[in-house]
Amino acid sequence: MKISNKQLKLVDRQIKRIIESGNYYSEVYKKAGITGVSTPEDFEKIPFTDKADLRNAYPLGIQAVPDEKVVRIHSSSGTTGKPVIIPYTAKDVEDWAEMFARCYRIAGITASDRIQITPGYGLWTAGIGFQAGCEKLGAMAIPMGPGNTEKQLQMMIDLKSTVICATSSYALLLAEEINRRGLKDKICLKKGVIGSERWSDAKRNYIARELGIELFDIYGLTEIYGPGIGINCAEQTGMHVFDDYLYLEIIDPVTGEVLPDGEEGEIVITTLVKEGAPLIRFRTHDLSRIILGECSCGLSYPRIDTIKGRSDDMFKVRGVNMFPSQVEEILGMVDGVSSEYKIDVAHDDIRNRDIIMVTVEAEGRVDFTKTAETIKNLFRSRMQITPNVAVVSLNTLPRSEKKTQRVFDHRKE
């Protein structure tokens, strides 16, 4: 997906704005001799940026407008290192709301819908983004925020919510609770807009089945507006990303080489019109690929595949590189195993080797011992490593109202 002339002009304007602002990236570009771009080759010479740069510029070093133009700040939900703070102008807020409203429309959501919003509010970009898009669309927002499942279910039933917005972890918790209480015939949900974390097909199928809804993946990250920069359509063939606001590349996460369309790698995003904190060639660390061809839904926005994970989610055990997505793929092959799992990695000092423990949930109808052996064999054949496996009953592992941590590496402690 080569950058278009129109996009090049927007990038050139952004670079000139950044240099004029005197912000953190102004100095980076001056040192690199970058004054603008006029060709795709010029664009590919621009150095990548990532979250480490944003932390180095803490708190507002990437701000590219005067203070009087900043109407809001948001911060990433990460828990390690300095937080990343992103300033927004009034136009940035409006652009984000418009993109989010597009997402709702693409999902077939209209002004007649009642949208229950469970992601968090505050510095995090989630809840307020879902609400702004809802209001832009003209639908009824039910701004619940996270937690208080009792109240969530009461409002869902009493207000006849038709759309649920949530992380996949909280959508799962709600689905399980509705199933446990026998409330399925009392809810009016038709669609779910799910974001913030990758989720397995097993979890997706369970949530869709138990809630009786059509599910849509929404994409975004705090550094690039927030959730709402892309969503999959009813054809379910990838997420459409709004190329009038953003330009996407896919790179090899190790070499930084730009990959041909269709090859899997790390998503890199350039903001074309963002004012408060424009970012050029920002490394998201999200792993996906650009889907070739036009979507049968008729939309011309380019598509990316379901997020496979993050390049920085990788963990190594006995020399084997592993991703949570690979674990989820294996577990999805085993009958009776749920989408919930936990991985513990530790070092056995006596034997001087790393050990890995995979804990999974399974339905009571399956033999837990045989299931554990099946999982071990699949790991051995597909990943050349044999873990210890514990199979536990459904609903044993903790549920989360936000993102669920899957991997616990005790070697770092």
Image: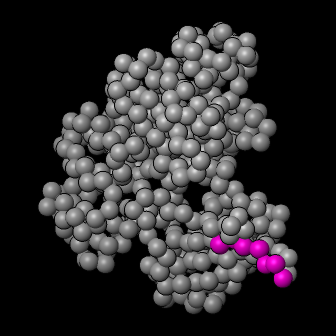
Residue 234 seen: no
**Residue drawn at 71 percent across, 25 percent down:** 47
Residues drawn in magenta: 344-350
State the predominant SS element of the stretch in magenta. Answer: strand
Q: Position of residue 396 (x, y in %)?
A: 47, 80
Instruction: State left or right for residue 199 relative to residue 101.
Output: right
**Where in the figure is residue 364, as x and y percent of width and height?**
48, 88
Q: Is residue 349 magenta?
A: yes
Q: Residue at x 65, y 18 (%)?
A: 27
Front one among 71 and 366: 71
Q: Nearer the viewer, residue 357 or 219?
A: 357
Q: Is residue 84 above or below residue 151?
A: above
Residue at x 34% of width, y 23% of height: 90
Is 197 magenta? The answer is: no
- Residue 129, percent across and down? 35, 40
- Please report the residue visible at 57 percent of the width from the left and 90 percent of the height from the top: 367
Q: Is residue 154 left or right of residue 87?
A: left
Q: Which image quadrant is residue 289 in?
A: top right
Q: Quadrant of the N terminus?
A: top right
Q: Is residue 391 visible?
A: yes
Going by the image, does 249 lie left or right of 66? right
Measured along the vertical axis of the image, is residue 140 above or below residue 354?
above
- Position of the C terminus, as image quadrant, is bottom right
Nearest the viewer among 185 and 157 is 157
Q: Picture coordinates of residue 274 (x, y %)?
A: 47, 23
